[in-house]
Amino acid sequence: MEERMITDFLLKQVDKPSRYIGGEINTYNKDLNEIDVHLAFAFPDVYEVAMSHLGMQILYHFFNRRKDTFCERVFSPWTDMEKLMRENDVPLFSLETHSNIKNFDMLAITLQYEMSYTNILNMLNLAKIPIFSKDRTEEDPIVIAGGPCAYNPEPLAPFVDFFYLGEGEYIYDEILDIYIQYKKARKTRWEFLEAMLDIEGMYVPMFYEEKYNEDGTIKERISLHPKAKPIINKVVMEDIDSVFYPDKQILPWIQAVHDRVMLEMFRGCLRGCRFCQAGMIYRPVREKSKDTLLKHAKNLLDSTGYEEISLASLSTSDYKQLEPFMEELIEMCNDKMVNISLPSMRIDKFSVDLMKRIQEVRKSSLTFAPEAGTQRLRDVINKNITEEEILNGCDLAFRGGWSRVKLYFMLGLPTETDEDIYGIADLAEEIARKYYTLDKSERPGMLQLVVSTSCFVPKPFTPFQWHGQDTCESFMKKHMLLKNAIRRKAIKYNHHDAKTSVIEAVIARGDRRVANLIYEAYNLGCTYDSWNEYFDFEKWVKASETAGVDFDFYASRERSYEEKLPWDFINIGVTKDFLISESKKSKEAKTTPQCREKCSNCGANKFKKGVCYEN
């Protein structure tokens, strides 16, 4: 057993020492002499955020079910701990055994948000692992990255040894088996990475190169190895009912952002909102059966003692067996005195009646996401919800005893006009009027209506991937326009920072040259960019000048359908032709029905599973 890297001396000096001590209920500890693969699962954010991530909980137990593998967790240390680590020459360490991350076989990083990328470089530096893949030796771990942001791997290509594109349970066992074989045969990291070229869904950046046109667009993509496939196909689990799912969940020492049992109901989404990357990359919809979900729920509640369970999906209302499932789940949770959290519900009578049943004692706020203020713009984004449905849903909620409602919108959506912005204020006002039409004796309390806007960020593999993003100045003008249009005191307005959204767009649609921007921003001290108190836009501007990366070229520039996009070599199943068709329909404000109403031939039926074949 190697020397532990953390001491009581350091722990006593930080704000929340529980972030670093490990040893939580339902964690693992194995003898390092009895394993073949020592793997670190990295989430590039602080403990409370990382411990809320369902994917981490699944893969942590998935890896540790193998006797030959020990998966430990490593998260980004908060700034107070990082300062002490650097002052005392303490390298980045794991939570379970406090071992030096540099001594692990593999470091697997989940990519959930572009604004965490500087944290990844910082974690590598703290671990004393060379930041650039080309500089690593046989003494360094293999650095792997996966998750939703990996579907455009190019901005991190120079820093990552290989990317896993698809669902982790599918092929990690095969990868670990190959690694053990190569390790015992004393083969090199280069030979192992070469072997990854034969595995479906794996992308090894060192075996590819980009060439550019004079205008800065991509000219061609060159394979540097005979086995380097021109197209990388994502991998998906076919039988979602039998896929591995943990029967326990790690209990954090301190409250996580989402501190409760998380139950994955299904993967994918039927709806096809044109701004939503998750709704495209996770197709096709594959549901777990009612009985499987109830079994998982019982196991997780029994093994954790949590008093709340959250149903995880992109659109909970679309679960086919929702009504009978909820009947049995409510009965189970009432017996155990457990609350049920229902995110991603659409506004209709059933969902409001359901919320009434599960919040009979204490009514929290209800959250609806109309996304746009006018029907025209909701049709542009394919939201497929009418103003009448929104108002009726809110009326049902008010009559059901709710007085706190949150409404989520986006600013800067394609084709947006001032009328659409005023439409947000008008819709909020109409909802407030619905409340005040109730007799005073029927009103559940003082109305609290919160309108929140995020800034539209064009994402890869969406029908809006070609659309330019608004500039910072445009977003700020729209914020003020909406703020001034909201007159009623009962309506509160919050908005997301525009500058952060611009950097997010630059990285999201970036090519390999954007890696230089991330590296220079990190060298200037950028970390925790997703946290308002640490995000420094001026440093990013300075980094762009040093790296020669023009924000407008990546964020606000409109792309043509003919342009080669940095992620075009990845096949998610959904075809580019379908995305182009949806993009064109958006410009005419034409909608596309959800998958169960009519198949739109998006291409996801190539997997021959899920909603595409359920009938």
Image (cartoon, grey):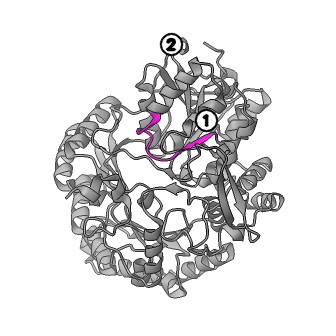
Quickly name the residue at label 1: 193
The percent position of residue 378, horizontal first and vertical second, equals 41, 78
From the viewer's perspective, is 78 left or right of 408? right
Q: Quadrant of the N terminus?
A: top right
Residue at the image position 37 percent from the left and 59 percent from the top: 604
Is 139 drawn above or below residue 161 in the view shown?
above
Quarter holding the C terminus is: bottom left
User: Is residue 409 left or right of 285 when viewed as pictured?
Assistant: right
Look at label 1 and name its amino acid.
Leu
User: Does residue 592 appear to the left or right of 6 in the view shown?
Assistant: left
Tell me the magenta residue range: 161-172
Residue 171 highlighted magenta (yes or no)? yes
Which amino acid, mark 2?
A: Glu
Q: Position of residue 388 (x, y in %)?
A: 30, 80
Mark 2 neighbour density, 10 Å: few (under 14) some (14–19) many (20 or more): few
Q: Nearer the viewer, residue 451 or 151?
A: 151
Q: Residue furthest right?
A: 546
Look at 53% across and 22% down and name the residue there. 181
Using the numbered discs, state the Cα–Cα distance from disc 2 to disc 1 in whole angstroms.
25 Å
Q: What kind of element bears circle 2?
A: helix
Q: Earlier in the sequence, mark 2 or mark 1?
A: 2
Please tell me which residue is depicted at 60% across the width and 41% down the height of the picture.
162
Residue 334 percent across, percent down from the top left: 21, 43
